[in-house]
Amino acid sequence: MASDPSSTSSTPAGSPNSSWSADPDVLKTLVGLLSSSVDPFANHSEVYRQLQQLQAHLQGDFELYLVFLMAQWNNPGLRVEVCQAAGLLLKQSVKSKYKDGVPESAKGFVKGALLNMFLQTDGNGQYKSKAVQNTLGALISTIVGFEGLSKWPDLLSKMMAQLGGREGGSGSLSAGLRLRQLEETLDFLFMILEEHAENAAVCQEVAELCRQFDLGNALLKKASEPKASIRVKALNCVYHILQILYLSHSVNMSKEVLGQQQLTQNTLNQLLVLTNDAEPEVKAAVCTGFVQILEVDAQLLQVHLENLMKYMLVMAQDEDILVAMEATGFWSAYIETIDYYCEDDFFGAPAPAPRRGDSFSSDCEYWLQLSLGELTRVLTSNMKFKQDDEDVISAEQIWDDIKANAHNPKIQAFQNTDVKPFHLRSTRGVPNGEEEEEEGNVVESWTLRKSSAGTLDTLAMHCGDSLLQYLMPIVIERLQNEDWSVRESAILALGAVITGCPGLEQHTLDVMKVVLPQLQQQQESQHPLLVTICCWTLSRFAGAIVTISSGSGEAGRDLYDQMHKSLLFNLRSLHPKVVESALSAVAVSIERSSFALLLQVLDPTIEEMRGALDRRQMLSERNLILVFDLVATLCQRVMKEEEAMLLFCDQRYLALVAGPLMDLLYSYQAQKFGDVVFLNLVQSLTWCLGAFGQAVESHSQQLVTFCIQVCQVCVSSGESEKSLYTISAILGLMAAVMHFPSSVQVLMGQNQEFFGFLCSCLHSTSPDVKQAAFSLCGSLLSHDVGQNPAEVVSELSKNVVQAGLLSLHKAVPDHGRDAKASLTEAALDEVNNALWCLCKAGKSMDGQTAVTLLGLVTPYLERTSGFPRIIVENATILIGCMAKTHSEAFAQYADHFFWSWAVALATLRDSDEKKDAFVGLFYVLQAREDVGRRHFPQVANAVASWHKDPPLLLRGMLAYYKDELGKLPGAVREKISVMFGL
């Protein structure tokens, strides 16, 4: 550092607070720490600790020192990286404490200094670096997010002057400096619009600026500036404004006013002018702009459709990848627009003869059909890997390294650090089969290839089998090409369209003849990316393969066997991308298989999974996690088949499948608890235990002991995010082990310290920990084990009720169709598990508590609220369980909840818990016979929902309503008569 920054000035120029001055010693200390923070070889944790100490010492002045240093960006004696580091640290401080922890005087000082930096140059007319500009913009945007633009009128005035919204522009400046200042203004405005698109207050202010100063049209004028980057940034700002004005429901802005300003029409006019622009970044922005017009007022494009189709086809073939990607994305938005406005249903039907119509949708469809052949050709061409593609270079480099080190057994396989995150699954979450299918990733980043494949998929969903007349000749030609990347693009195209073009399933055998040989070659003759896409395409055809195999006798079984074993063969590959795609495809094959086909490949699959676990030192972390997922997928599939469940009770299968997972779990050192691989291992083992039944019991005590040790380690390490995830996963595993009475005795009878810890988890600040704690507590309370101390059960029930009431009260949904949207996924899991667990603790509730809980549970019965089915089921069962012991108290409120509850009862699946709920129904109707008569059709539907073994007490209940039976629809009346002999 050439000079002391405090030697030039002790207060930022233009600051409103001239009474504050910087202490030179503090400045020197802070500069030293910030210099270390940007030194890659420094001890950053120690630097951060010292910065925290300095912040505590300076209290409210810390932000003033930071903004002072940031304002020294033009001081030649101070590294610009230090100024930027000060700004980033200031942003972090502002985000965490600006609202309540920064005094008003300090806020004014900071805002004044930042405003002075805005549009500032140094003494030689040099402009700020891009890094400093970005940091300054991030700070200004953060403060605007807290208090809006209206409370910063000086900033607003300065920005509007640049945009031509007010007088006082910078006409005396040089053209170059004027453009730099305009570009900085656009950058700041874009940052504010992008970061606060969901901030209703900021959006309202933007709408007001459009009303008062015609902000949108002012920006459009800047889209004619000579500098390409300014044209692009002005357009991007306009796009955000269009989104705010037309699509934000939180802004009360008159469409009539916007119509007078003609912002959308003017935007379209500007885009049409810029279609002649040769700059790649402008062309990309124009393509984005047409997508925006489709979203906000698509019908403006009706008279331009012919030229628009031609333009987008040309742009989709542009040499600039970004331009081609934006143009490719346009077609997906265009198809969605047709579907939105469509009056005729083209989906799945043969393509009609192209014709123009009176409606906007028919015109859109007309021009799409005329462009379909060329569009299909362009998309399939864009799906080919380029030789300089990063994925190709990376895959080939990995393969070269593996071959070069093949002679050295000590060299491990490529260790992919891009590990997919751990996603905690609720033990009592969405039932198997209701989760969305996770598609295998074709490529890891959004590229032209992936964009084109996605658009082709959308096109197939819209056009159906009519697309095949254009696609198949292209695919057949490309499959005969000697270039692997051309063949790969054809195979990708087949996988991309299979969902939308069911007619392609009749060519499944032909597809297999092309794909299987690629998978059955030795590794040395394979290209890893070609094998990868073959695995993915087979997974997309898995349903069709299973259908053909199941209906074709021995030949069909042989077909499935070839497909599945070809995928298993590639689990042994040394290339991580091949192993990853093969693991994902095997999992899909297992999910889609019939029971007979599953048995056929069960032993080979288990053998390969076991082999993969034995080779875990040679696998990337990502692939090891996928092996865990594959084991869990097999176990979940087995749990759907009663015969397979009996098969898995064999200790041999336990040793082959779950045994290696348990051995690996016990081998983990304490410092690795919470690592992503460990968490996924715990999750996989949790899913596995349910598949092995009594075979697991001999291992349950060791599992419980290990889990308690892990929790003890987490408690001693503090409440970090890592420890919270670990506790949540371990509690979920313990809940699965509690199926066995011996495990319950170990936990509740011998571990008082752990019991206290479990009760504290019910009151954790983490929804993930709470949902897992509810799951474990519910499993414990489900057992009626005589050895359990009564005081332990009582205390546990008491904590469950307290925590359950708090969780439900915090998450009480708003009435309406979108009530679910107000809750995060973790909160939904917490609510679901709380509802289920409270069913087990219901006996300990007094009448007043039960009534309070009834009010909290009733909103979850609403069918239109969008909650997962399992939450509705657990809420319904909980009311029934409480009604058994509190029927008199509930009867007083039956007019408010009974109709919704009776309707929900009819949706329950047969189970012991459903029986408990119907016992509650019986007692409520005993107390309120009039409610039963008023809502007897709903009661009858609920009773008729039983498929077998309904509670016998229902017969007595129906006797009260004999005269009502004759009023029921025939089918319901007949079923009830048969069930109970009435």
Image (cartoon, rainbow, N blue to C red):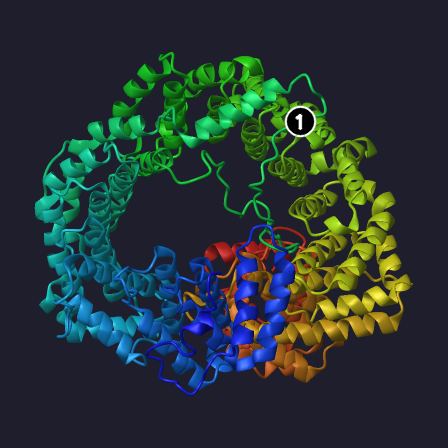
Residue named by callout 1: 605
Q: Residues within 10 Å of mark 1 (few under 14, many from 20)?
A: many
Kindly indicate the quadrant of the structure image that contains residue 106: bottom left
> Quick check: 911 left or right of 299?
right
Residue at x-position 71% and y-position 32%: 617
Residue 236 against residue 160 in the figure, above or below: above
Q: Is residue 626 above or below residue 29?
A: above
Is residue 932 visible in this depiction of the protein?
no
- Residue 411 location in percent, x, y? 68, 26
Left or right, 247 with respect to 510, comes to left
Q: Is residue 180 left or right of residue 355?
A: right
Amino acid, disc 1? Thr
Residue 467, quarter of picture: top left
Between residues 323 and 397, which one lies in front from this camera angle? 397
Q: Position of residue 690 (x, y in %)?
A: 72, 45
Q: Position of residue 29 (x, y in %)?
A: 57, 69
Tell me the element at label 1: helix
Q: Quadrant of the C terminus?
A: bottom right
23 above or below 180?
below
Q: Position of residue 235 (x, y in %)?
A: 21, 55
**Which is more toward the observer, 900 or 811?**
811
